[in-house]
Image: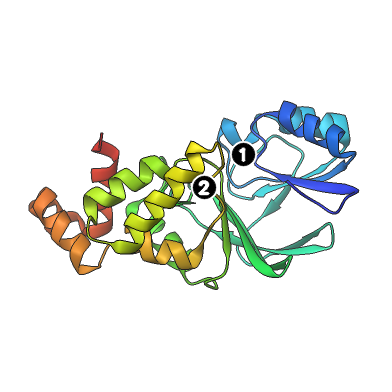
Amino acid sequence: MLHDGREALVVDPGDAAPVLQALQQEDLELRSILVTHHHADHTGGIHTLRDTTGAQVWGPARESIPAPYQPLAQGQQLTCLGLSFEVLDVPGHTAGHIAFYSADIEGAPLLFCGDTLFSAGCGRLFEGTPEQMEDSLRRLAMLPAATRVCCTHEYTLSNLRFALAVDPDNTDLLAYQAHCQALRDRGLPTLPSSIDLERRINPFLRASAPPILAALHAFDAAGLAHDGAFATLRRWKNEYR
């Protein structure tokens, strides 16, 4: 949720109840609902919130979102609460997944990326291809280093376990794991992350780095040769326990 003390927007409300509770506690009016993709854990609260508050819904043009909503695609702009957002097409997790990027919210860029980019990870490929996801992540990684990454699941510690299996000598990764563990031990979120940090610690943004290529070769040399680094890395993560 973002708000200006009077009005609010929310992103990917899978459940209406916590949103309604927050609105009541902060004495806010919900004006806008931004949706990155069609999965129920991102859309389940839309009907109730729209019926209760009259908020306008914005979502991906190439996916089915609970109607009515304003469809959005790459390059479009929207303004909510006086904040300007650029829409980015980031297929991979789903076929029509979008992200919302603002160049300046409270002094720094902000990205709502849904289930495309996670801290130290990326979303599963339910509908898109490895090539699509790799391209989507490449474009997100080109955003300004200071961009705050607001993804939609607290998967960081799990992702870090896999990242360290792939890239065990990465000192930035080791330091970040200790930092995130300390946050979770105190009941605090690890998010938002930043583009600068993800460039350094996220294996899915570094699939062609020599240490990761070496690990992928040891994991499945034939798969690496046939499918390429990113697809092999995503398959390894799918199988990792």
Q: Nearer the viewer, residue 4 or 135?
A: 4
- The amino acid type, in three-letter code, at marker 1 is Ser
Check the picture and name the quadrant holding the C terminus.
Answer: top left
Residue 75 at least partly seen: yes
User: Which of these two is toward me, 26 or 38?
Assistant: 26
Residue 90 x/y as whole percent? 50, 57
- Identity of the residue drawn at 41% across and 48% down: 128
Tell me where residue 197 appears, x and y as whole percent. 45, 64
For disc 2, the neighbor class at 10 Å (few under 14, some 14 to 19, many from 20) is some
Q: Estimate how packed mark 1 is, as few (under 14), some (14 to 19) or many (20 or more) residues with alpha carbons within 10 Å.
A: some
Q: Is residue 148 left or right of residue 24?
A: left
Q: Secondary structure at mark 1?
A: loop
The x and y percentages for residue 239 are 24, 37
Answer yes or no: is residue 232 visible. no
Q: Nearer the viewer, residue 155 or 88?
A: 155
Which scheme is used to colour this image of the protein?
rainbow
> Is residue 114 toward the left or the right of residue 14 in the image?
left
Question: Where is mark 2, residue-wise?
Answer: 190
Q: CA distance from mark 2 to mark 1?
A: 31 Å
Where is mark 1, residue-wise?
A: 64
